[in-house]
Each structure stands twice: as C-alpha cells, then as structure tokens.
Amino acid sequence: MKFKRPKGTKDILPSEIFKWHFIENKIRHITSLFNFHEIRTPTFELSELFSRGVGSQTDIVSKEMYSFSDKGGDSLTLRPEGTASVVRAILENSLLQSSSLLKLYYIASMFRREKPQAGRFREHTQFGAEIIGSDSYFSDIEVIMLASELYSQCGISNFIIKINSIGKLEERNFYISELKKYLKSNLEQLSDDSKRRFEINPLRILDSKNQNDIEITANAPKILDYLSHESKLRFDNVVNELEKLNLKYEIDFRLVRGLDYYTDTTFEFVSKSLGAQDAIGGGGRYDGLFKQLGGKDIPGVGFGSGIERILIAAEKNNFNFKTAECIKLYFIALNNDAKKIVYDLIIKLRKKNISCDTDFLNRSLKSQLRDADKLKAEFVYIIGENEIKKNKGILKKMSDSSQIELGFQELINFNFNIEN
Ligand code: HAM
C-alpha cells in the first residue's frame, strides 16, 4: 500500500522551503519593527475553548473542527484559529497587568475540515497578531499597517482592504432583528444554507456566495445605519486614518466574518491574485472575548493571514524570493586519505560559520561536480593524491570557473565573503 498525505494537507519540499523561510523571516523582522512579541500555545486545546470563544453556531465550530476524546475522556480539538488560545494563555498566565498592553504574534498550524480547493487547506499555517488592552482606534490601524507592510514587502501590491463595523453586541442584536424582519418576506427564495442560517446565524446570510442570496440581501438594512454614535465615530476614525495612509479600502456591509467574537471593526485583505479564496488575511476587534472566556472586560484587536495565501499572491505578482538557499563550499575528495582531510576541514570551517558539504556516496569527480552545481555551491575545493603531497587543494569559484591553489590551513582563514 502506498500512503498518501491526508486530503487538504501539503508537503513543503526542500525545493520550495526558501520561500517559506523568506516570508517567516519577513514576519519576524516586521513584527520586531512594530514591537510585537511571539507567543506559542499548544496545538490542541479543550474543545470548549473554541465553542465558547469562536461560537458554537459558527461553521468553524459546528462543522470544521478536528475534535477527539482522549483516553482520559477530555474532549480536545486541534486549534482551528489562534485568537481564543492567545486569550486563554494571557488569562491563565496572568500576562496582563492593569493598564498594560500586549502586542503578540504567532506563526502556527491551524486545522479546519473545510472542502479543499486552491488556497484552502485542512491544515494551514497562519501568521496572527493581536493587540490586547487598548480600545484606541489606532490599535486597529496598527494591526492593519502590520499586515499591509508584510504584504508589500512580499511584493503583493494589488490588495484592497475591505472594512466594516458590526458594532457592539446590543447594536448588533437590534440590527439582526431588523435584518430578520427583512429576510422573512424573502425566506422561500433564499438558498438552503441561508434558510438554515436564518435561525442560527442570520448575519452570515450577508456573506453568502449564492447569486440569488446576493441579490436579495443587496437591499437589506445595512448595519452601519444601526450603529450607536460611539461605534459610528470609531468606524469613521478608522476609515479616515486608512484614507490618510493612502491604503486602498472599500467599505463592505457584507463583511461580517465567520467568527462570533468580533465587535466593531472587521476587515479583510483581498487580492485578485487569489481567485475564489481571495482573502489573504482578515481580522477585527474582539472587545467581548476576554469576558466570554472568564476574564475581565479587556479589549483586543488582531488579524490572521494564511502563509500559503501570501505565497500564492506573491508568486502571482512574480515576486522574486531571492535564490534558493545554497552552500558556500563543496568539498571533493578523490580518495580515502583526502576524505579524512576534507572532514577535518569541514568541521573547522563550519565552526567559522561557513556552510559546507561533501559527497557521501563515493561518486566520481564528474558527478561530484554536478552535485556541487545542483546544490548551487559558490566554491568547490578539490583534494586528490597530488594535492595531499603539496598540502594544497584546488579552490574553484563556480560562477566563473576560475581556480587557485590554496593550502589546507589557508583555506580555513580564507575570506569567502570578500572573495565572492
Ligand atoms: P480567519 O479569517 O478565519 O480569521 O483566518 C485568517 C486567515 O487565515 C484567512 O484570511 C486566510 O488567509 C487564512 N485561512 C483561513 N482558513 C484557511 C484555510 N482553510 N486554508 C488556507 N488559509 C486559511 C481567524 O482565524 C482569526 N483568528 C483572525 C484574527 C486574529 N482575528 C482577530 N485576531
């Protein structure tokens, strides 16, 4: 039997890992510029964390979670998203003292049993960032800026920020009752999915992809008309700031997001490069989540972005990820005595931070040279019988095939960076 990877998962092969490293390094660089700090939480949590945090009626919790009972009888779930885990970790470890602020980020696998398609996986890697403890609209802007900066530095220029406000719980509840009144008269024409959502999660009818649903909801009441003065002011402030920063945005009354914890600002970064799954990233405020998970009334805002989608969008924009990672020096030993010398040199050079490798398959000179070429080695150092006698090997620069004789000890002190 030939094993295959589970549906909706992927292997990231050595030939493409440099793109992942590039994006991950960019994330670490930009988060440090913005003063975010990394947090790592467990891959699985008690299932109740997500049903309470994300919402038991959401698609993620009701249909897509990988949950299981362990031998002790606990119901556990592979995390489908990161925010609930971060909030749990902050509460459990008492990370937030009064009037303090946390800026946290993570790069972690998320698991959702969705129908796989281009850009949609059952395990994806998400970069997420959260600002905890501030309700200033500038913290909304800070996370939007963080995402924008990352996308720009990955060569993604054709994104637009869809933005909306879903208000506070009371405003939203009143709006939902008005929305339901409107939808009730069209209930029969709605898709089966939307009919089901009418009772359990009517807001999600607004982001249905069904053409008929889209036409019906085009004239539905709009949530922005139901916001309190305070929520409207916050929304206007965020939008004005986007305007000032020259970021391309579009107000979208359909942007309700698929997680229940959001309040006020919601946003999504969409890119035409992505096709049907056009969200590179998304997020919003979640001022009620801490209370929902047993904490005090602490505000928060954040976003998440699938690295796979960043990669797809960057590639569609013909981004040059720099060349694949390569080694500095490849050693070719032409007999057993040479091999011993080579290994001694390799150990010494690696201690000097020079990346090097050699042949472990006893191949011919020609195929070792081919191997060095495949590995994109910058230099090759060859030792055979003659070279052992002279205590000198042949150093070849691969880019122009020039070569010099260089003593074994001299090689260790050779300045590869300047010479290249
Ligand atoms: P989300 O919109 O569910 O939000 O996911 C965030 C991003 O993760 C999406 O925009 C997309 O780039 C990526 N993503 C989600 N599901 C998949 C999938 N099946 N395959 C590939 N990529 C996917 C959240 O998860 C929130 N926790 C974000 C957040 C943080 N809100 C506030 N703080």
Image: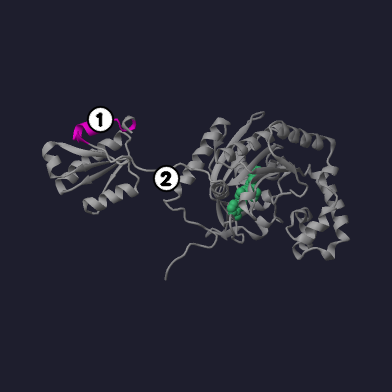
Decide: is 74 above or below 244.
below
- Magenta stretch: includes residue 409: yes
Viewer-nearest residue: 79 or 309: 309
Q: Describe residue 322's horizontal placement relative to residue 202 as left or right.
A: left
Quadrant for residue 395, please give it. Answer: top left
Q: Residue 334, how many percent across, how many down?
A: 18, 48
Residue placed at 32% from the left, 47% from the top?
373
Horizontal side of 259 relative to 360 (left or right) equals right
Q: Which residues are magenta?
A: 404-417
Q: Which mark is residue 31?
A: none
Q: Give the number of the disc on residue 324.
A: 2
Among the 4 quarters of the image, the one containing residue 136: top right
Q: Give the image quarter of residue 149.
A: top right
Q: Quadrant of the C terminus?
A: top left
Residue type highlighted by circle 1: Asn
| Residue 41 visible within the image | no
Say which residue label 1 marks: 413
Percent from the top left, x then y, of residue 54?
67, 50
Q: Which of the two discs, 2 and 1, sits closer to the camera? A: 2
In this view, the residue in front, 232 or 409, is 409
Whichever of callouts 2 and 1 sits on the residue coming sooner in the sequence is 2
> The residue tagged with tag 2: helix, strand or loop?
loop
In the rendered image, the vertical position of residue 47 relative to residue 341, given as above or below: below
